Image: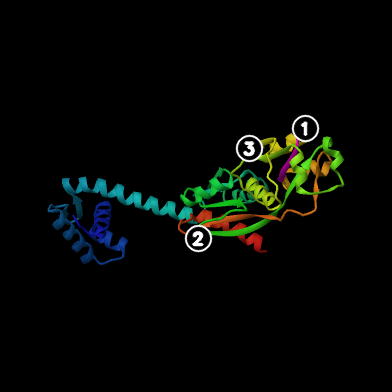
Amino acid sequence: MDINLEYYRVFYHVSRLGSITGAAEELCISQPAVSQAVRQLEKALNCQLFIRTSKGVHLTEEGALLYSYVERGLLSIQDGEGMLRRMQDLETGEIRIGASDMTLQFYLLSYLEAFHERHPGVKVMVSNAPTPETMESLYEGKIDFGVVSTPLKPRPEVKMTPVRKIRNVFVAGERFAYLKGKTLEYESLLTLPCILLEPRTSTRTFLDEFLAENQVKLAPEFELATSDMIVQFALRNLGIGGVVWDFAREKLESGELFELKFLREMPEREFCIVTDKRNPMSPAGRRLLGMMIEHEEC
């Protein structure tokens, strides 16, 4: 049944006020327009909805039944409009972000803290996973945006925005102190126990590709799930750890670990914000993303 929804809105106000005149004033339309809308609705439904009296109108049994449904429907619409305004005003809403341990700890976390202080009603959900899994979540529309590390080869629909440089290093503990001050070839790693991240992470991919350019293919003594654990293994002199410098910073500055030096430095990598042009983003997501991009451009 194809009935103009405006008729139901007029019906709701006439029913609630019990007056054609009152409804016309509230809706800012003429009394004849209100009467016409009621007649059209009664005609379409093939029943009488109101009983007219000198004091106004009141609902028939059929009209009372219809009103109970129309009232719920219109109030639900008003609730939806109100919730939408709250989302747009960032009083509520949800952001879905993908990030690795590294990008979360050394980049994203400070922005989440600042955003939460400004908009405590917004729910932020962070999917903590390596870069390849974050990219899959982006392609599948499961997240608003991701914060990942290079190298990666995204699909054409993905926009990458570099936001921070990072550097990979090899670190060691006191057991390997004889390497301090020496400038090494990467081939030297072939004779040393090495500790690397598990395959299929951006850091491991970068190290494998860079070492391959130097005709080196490592068979690590240990392959670990997190860079924090690599630092702990290196502290216990279990091998040479390949990590992003930020993870080892505290121990390098304290002297508990030292950084190995090589003839050729590894190129810098980047943290990047990635968005998919096909995926609509929530107002809250756009606001947080704007905060991050604006800060980097300052």
* Residue at the extreme front of the image, as rendered: 215
What secondary structure prevails in the magenta region?
A: strand
In the image, residue 133 lies in the stretch drawn in magenta: no
Mark 1 vs 3, N-terminal side: 3
Q: Circle 2 is placed at which residue position? A: 156
Q: Distance of mark 2 from mark 1, alpha carbons?
A: 44 Å
Q: Distance of mark 2 from mark 3, alpha carbons?
A: 30 Å
Q: Nearer the viewer, residue 229 or 169?
A: 169
Residue 212 is situated, as x and y percent measured from the top left of the image, at 67, 50
Q: Does residue 92 show up?
A: no
Residue 13 is situated, as x and y percent measured from the top left of the image, at 28, 55
Residue placed at 73% from the left, 40% from the top?
241
Residue placed at 60% from the left, 51% from the top?
148
Mark 2 vs 1, N-terminal side: 2
Looking at the figure, which quarter contains the C terminus? bottom right
Q: Amino acid at mark 1?
A: Arg
Mark 3: which secondary structure? loop
Q: Distance of mark 1 from mark 3, alpha carbons?
A: 17 Å
Q: Circle 3 is placed at which residue position? A: 225
Which contiguous range is marked in magenta?
A: 239-243
Mark 2 vs 3, N-terminal side: 2
Mark 2: which secondary structure? loop
Looking at the figure, which quarter contains the N terminus? bottom left
On the picture, is 117 further left or further right than 249? left
Is the residue marked by circle 2 packed among few (<14), some (14-19), or many (20+) residues within 10 Å? few
Q: Amino acid at mark 2?
A: Pro
Q: Circle 1 is placed at which residue position? A: 236
Residue 238 is situated, as x and y percent measured from the top left of the image, at 75, 33
